[in-house]
Amino acid sequence: MYSKEKILAALAEVKHPEKGKDIVTLGLVSEIISDSEGISITLAPDKSNDPFINSIRSSVTRSLKENLGPDVTVRDIRVIPRVEVPKHHEKEKELLSGIKNIIAVSSGKGGVGKSTIAVNLAIAIGMKGFSVGLLDADIFGPSIPKMLNAEDYRPEVRMKDGKDLIVPLERYGVKILSTGFFVSPSEAVIWRGPMASGFLKQLMEQGDWGELDYLIFDLPPGTSDIHLTLVQEVPVTGAIVVSTPQAVALADAIKGISMFRSEKINVPVLGLVENMSWFTPAELPDKKYYIFGKDGCRDLAEKMDVPLLGQIPLVQSICEGSDNGNPVVLDGSATANAFMDLADEVIEKVEIRNRDHRPTIKVEMNK
């Protein structure tokens, strides 16, 4: 083991490229651990998007080996940005301050059943005894109103504590808001990115969500302004990526996982959900036909080191439930049980994430 003094002396030789002072003087070194397994350093930059942090991490490793010997083991260099809370900060003014867990459901490409997963998952978690909300953040293609037979629903606005709040639809024990509640089903939403992002923020800020255990966001496919708005406005607990086992869908799922894991975003990926895993005809309930390939998401989950949260079959009842506003999770079938099992997995992964990791912080990005 090495003394803290020797380690600090080595770190004092590492300068911040922009500020011109060493990282010890700047107070960037927040923790040093030296034991039989090696040295662990925690760096605490002023902002999460410091462009020089990767260079500093490399310089830290190099300086430790140069000053303490080439055989020194640098086990870990963590980066945890400092979070300063204004003196007169009021928690009530934070977006979604009454929500315990914010879950992003996303997909790399469209057509993989992401919204179907989001709807049935939200209801299933609610059936487990949790308070749940669902925000349809697919601004340009909102499908959740159709899935819940609520295309004609128009939210009320009521005054609460001097503020106008939008009253969510409550269906199957879940509070729901969607762009689709404000436009005709036949009307195209033709907005530029800032307008869409602004409307999402309005649904978050003015939605009368109250206190919830889970708020699930059904995000648009791909990676867009909406994704960035979400992670910049609220601390996202974790992300779920939905894909089919088809190679084309998996290629885009990789991009989705990589986006959430990127250094700037840094949102934990709770796992993958494989939708349309196999086709089972109603008249042959014991048969499985792997029309999109077999175990594509299982293999990708192992490759990307993320959990496979569940495999949902392609059955007629899922399609019918989505079309007629009666989600399949409610019918007590084997498919419904698959969604209930998925809910169990998500709840478990969220509990583990909250137990073992620091809370996610909002993303700061240079404009």
Image (cartoon, rainbow, N blue to C red):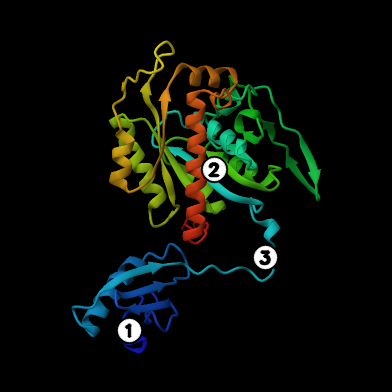
The picture places residue 361, in percent across and down from the top left corner, at: 52, 59
The picture places residue 348, in percent across and down from the top left corner, at: 49, 47
The picture places residue 306, in percent across and down from the top left corner, at: 36, 47
| Residue at the image point whose x is 48% and y is 54% from the top | 353
Residue most extreme to the left:
70
| Residue at the image point whose x is 57% and y is 38% from the top | 125
| Residue at the image point whose x is 54% and y is 43% from the top | 194
Q: Earlier in the sequence, mark 1 or mark 2?
A: 1
Disc 3 to disc 2: CB gap under 8 Å? no
Per the model, the C-alpha gap separating discs 1 and 3 is 37 Å
Per the model, the C-alpha gap separating discs 3 and 2 is 27 Å
Tell me if mark 2 has few (under 14), some (14-19) or many (20+) residues whose alpha carbon lies within 10 angstroms of its own.
Answer: few
Query: In the image, what residue type sits under mark 2?
Result: Pro
Secondary structure of the residue carrying tag 1 is helix
Q: Which residue is mark 3?
A: 89
Tell me if mark 1 has few (under 14), some (14-19) or many (20+) residues whose alpha carbon lies within 10 angstroms of its own.
Answer: some
Q: Earlier in the sequence, mark 1 or mark 3?
A: 1
Query: In the image, what residue type sits under mark 3?
Result: His
Q: Is residue 219 visible?
A: no
Q: Is residue 302 above or below residue 176?
A: below
Q: Which residue is mark 2?
A: 194
Q: Which residue is mark 1?
A: 7
Q: Earlier in the sequence, mark 3 or mark 2?
A: 3
Per the model, the C-alpha gap separating discs 1 and 2 is 47 Å
Quadrant hosting residue 45: bottom left
- Image position of 346 (left or right of 158): left
| Residue at the image point whose x is 52% and y is 51% from the top | 236
Which quarter of the image is occupied by the N terminus?
bottom left
Nearer to the camera, 56 or 330: 330
